[in-house]
Image: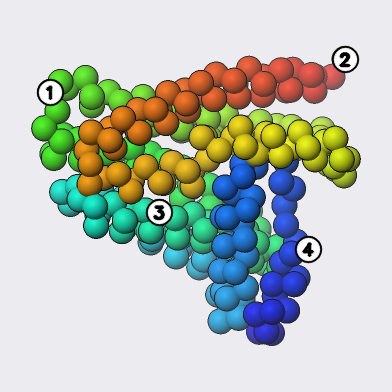
Amino acid sequence: MGSTGAALRALRGAQKSSKGVSLYSRYLNRPAGRLLAAGAHRVGLTPNQVTGISAVFTFAAIGAVALVEPSWWLGAAVYAGLALGFAFDSADGQLARLTGRGGPDGEWLDHVVDCAKMILVHTAVLVSFHRFAGLGSDAWLLLPLGFQFAAVLTFCAGLLREQLGRAAAGAAPAESGATARVSRVRAVALLPADYGVFCLVFLLLGAPTAFRAGYAVLAAVHALFLVAFLVKWFGELRALRAD
């Protein structure tokens, strides 16, 4: 299957554009995915098998949130599972580009797993709140539902924006120095909405009050980003209308 080093060198030239990608994904998750993709290539895994591995880590961690009483060790285990699942989620696409074995079935499977994890992770938090948190008010149960709504709608609207605008967008121009600087600022600004940053909040599971506070802050941030993204994407698609 070739050496891991050769695969890594090939993968460095087979990366997607970093435009619109947060700092975490750009400098942590994608490089981790690159290492995992090289290892998967070395042992002969297919991109769809890597997607399956991502799903196993992700859904095992999500199941633990719903079924196990919160604690510091659980938080560390959940974070590790979600972060590994996210890295393998990056690896499957990189492996597909490296091997040329990607296809609509793989892209479909990847999106299905992504959508499922967005729905289930907030459902798991809802179940955990109900079973273990001893909340003073049932209004707290609305928080995971609102977060789920913002996350899933952002994902679906963004996917539609990509699909509807792909034909008219053409090839992306190379980044100039000024564009690259704007891209870096955007990468920092997008950090609070990055799934990898969201995973970090589960490290607070051992301190329920701190976890709820951190989760609520991220929910509010995602709601604000949802509004901003919807306005931006609608404007971009409207501009693509034929005269």
Question: Is any atom of residue 59 visible in this view?
Answer: no
Judged from the image, the secondary structure of the residue bearing numbered disc 3 is: helix
Residue type, mark 4 in image: Gly
Alpha carbon distance from label 2 to label 3: 46 Å
Secondary structure at numbered mark 1: loop
The amino acid beneath tag 1 is Gly
Q: Amino acid at mark 2?
A: Asp
Determine whether the residue tagged by mark 2 lies in a helix, strand or loop: loop
Residue at x-position 70% and y-position 62%: 97
Residues packed near mark 3 inside 10 Å, few (<14), some (14 to 19) or many (20 plus):
many
- Dot placed on the residue nearer the N-terminal end, 2 or 3: 3
Asked whether the viewer can see residue 42, the reply is: yes
Q: Return the residue found at the far top.
A: 243
Q: CA distance from mark 2 to mark 4?
A: 38 Å
Q: State the mark number for residue 109.
A: none
Q: Tag 4, which secondary structure?
A: loop
N-terminal label among 4 and 3: 4
> How far apart are labels 4 and 3 at the CA level?
27 Å
Which percent across, then down, holds residue 187?
A: 65, 39
Residue placed under numbered mark 2 in the picture: 243
Disc 4 to disc 1, how far (Cα)? 53 Å
Q: Between tags 2 and 4, which lies in front?
A: 4
Q: Residue at x 29, y 37 (%)?
A: 211
Instruction: Confirm or deny contact between disc 2 and disc 3 (CB under 8 A).
Output: no
Residue 82: which disc?
Answer: 3
Q: Nearer the viewer, mark 2 or mark 1?
A: 1
| Nearest-to-viewer mark from 1 and 3 | 1
Please name the residue that numbered disc 4 is placed on.
Answer: 13
CA gap, disc 2 and disc 1 = 57 Å
* Amino acid type of the residue that numbered disc 3 sits on in the rendered structure: Leu
